[in-house]
Amino acid sequence: MRLTVLGKCRPKVIDVKEDLALVERKKHVVKLDGLQLAAYRIRVEKVLRDLFETNETLQRIKRGQPVSQTDLEALTSLVLTQDPMLDLHDLVDYYPDCAGQLDLAIRSIIGLDAEAVHERFTSFVQQNNLNAAQIRFLDLLQNHIAKYGSIEVARLYEPPFTSLHTDSLDGLFPDEEQAHNILQIIDSFRSPEPGTAVA
């Protein structure tokens, strides 16, 4: 870097050498919130919906099936060809509830196939004699998972899930085995840890 300092007589040139080992580069993540995040979500959703019919990876994510890291990288590249300013890797920063898993972040935008969600709850409903409030709770739960791709357990203790019983899951399903089985079903919508091999 050359700086020229003007003096009274003649310009003085100072040559400062940079040590490349000391140069730091960091990725700046823009924090989106409110309307910005909503607009970003709409933009991502449009690109993904346009690709959905022809992309097997997106179809598998929507069905709740595991996908490999290679599949996700190919999808990310494809999205970049559609919109060069849209890097799917940024989704894990904008959707922190997805535990750093890109497929969960994508699923939180495109949702899950309602039939695939219903199938996971069917055997539980058939094996248990449930009352109307319990069935309604499971309907709310299935709708939420179909729309957002998964649910955090803490969310169960907020409206609308507390509208049927103030203690939500605990109050509606006092049988610990039933409550445990519901939590296992919820957990089944989570993806394997990143890097897990998929056949």
Image: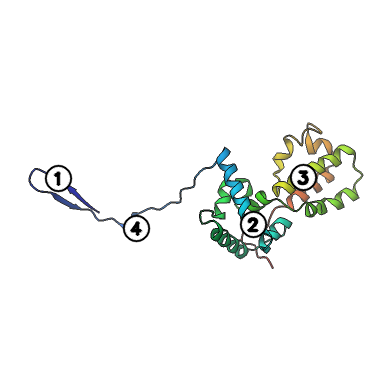
Q: Is residue 85 above or below residue 152?
A: below
Residue drawn at x 71%, y 56% is 62
| Nearest to N terminus: mark 3 or mark 4 | 4
Dot 2 lies on which element? helix
Q: Which residue is mark 1?
A: 6
Where residue 138 appears, as percent x and y from the top left, is 82, 43
Dot 4 lies on which element? helix
Q: Is residue 178 left or right of residue 154?
A: right
Q: Quadrant of the N terminus?
A: bottom left
**Residue 108's disc number:** none
Dot 1 lies on which element? loop
Q: Which residue is mark 4?
A: 21
| Nearest to N terminus: mark 2 or mark 3 | 2
Q: Which residue is mark 2?
A: 50
Q: Looking at numbered disc 1 in the image, what kind of residue is underneath it?
A: Leu
The furthest residue to the right? 129
Q: Is residue 109 left or right of residue 7?
A: right
Q: Which residue is mark 3?
A: 143
Separation of residues labelled 2 and 3 (CA atoms): 23 Å
Dot 3 lies on which element? helix
Nearest the eye: 83 or 192: 83
Q: Is residue 129 above or below residue 1?
A: above
Q: What scheme was used to colour the molecule?
A: rainbow
Q: Is residue 34 left or right of residue 147?
A: left
Q: Looking at numbered disc 2 in the image, what kind of residue is underneath it?
A: Asp
Separation of residues labelled 2 and 1 (CA atoms): 59 Å
Residue drawn at x 77%, y 45% is 143
Label 2 environment density (alpha carbons within 10 Å; few <14, some 14–19, many ≥20) = few
